[in-house]
Image (tube, helix red, strand yellow):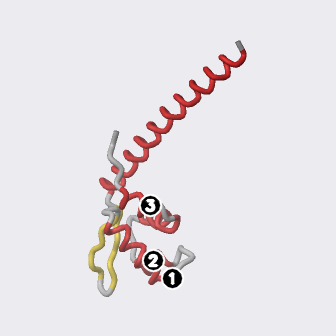
Amino acid sequence: MTAVDDELWSAVGDPIRRRMLDLLLTGGGGTATTLSDHLPVTRQAVAKHLGVLDRAGLVHGTALGRERRYEVDRAQLARAVAQLTAVGAAWDARLHRIKRIAEAIQQAREE
């Protein structure tokens, strides 16, 4: 199973940050100012969220005049998707085992 990166999942756990990733992916990148035009938070809040995403390696910023232009790190995003897939598969297997146990208990009661 793929190891889960808690910092990565903490970063994508916030709905505003997930929306920011969507905006950056569809727009090919953006600045705190351009992102704040599409979000229900201030430019300063967007900048703080970008800092969290940057520390998790999900985005990278480059200087653009007085601002920074951010783009999604597709390799890190792919890593996040792989982790989610692995965690989902593990939980599916656990739930399947629980279902089999519950069915066996039910069948034993009926006999």
x and y, in percent, of residue 70 in the image: 34, 71
**Residue 106: in sight, yes or no?**
yes
> Label 1, label 2: how many angstroms apart (C-alpha)?
6 Å
12 sits left or right of 109 in the view: left
Q: Where is the C terminus found, in terms of image quarters?
A: top right
Helix, strand or loop at mark 3: helix
Choose top left, top right, bottom left or bottom right for residue 31: bottom left
Instruction: Between residue 65 and residue 61, name the one nearer to us.
Output: 61
Q: Where is the N terminus found, in terms of image quarters?
A: top left
x and y, in percent, of residue 73 in the image: 32, 60
Q: Mark 2 sits on what residue?
A: 46
Q: Residue at x 32, y 55 (%)?
A: 76
Helix, strand or loop at mark 1: loop
Q: Mark 3 sits on what residue?
A: 12
Name above or below for residue 76 compared with residue 53.
above
Instruction: Between residue 33 and residue 51, name the one nearer to us.
Output: 51
Residue type at mark 3: give it.
Answer: Val
Helix, strand or loop at mark 2: helix
Disc 3 crowd, CA 10 A, few/some/many (<14, 14-19, 20+): many
Earlier in the chain: of badge 3 and badge 2, it is 3
Q: Nearer the viewer, mark 1 or mark 3?
A: 3
Residue type at mark 1: give it.
Answer: Thr
Q: Mark 1 sits on what residue?
A: 42
Q: Of all residues shown, which one is farthest toward the left?
A: 63
**Residue 78: in sight, yes or no?**
no
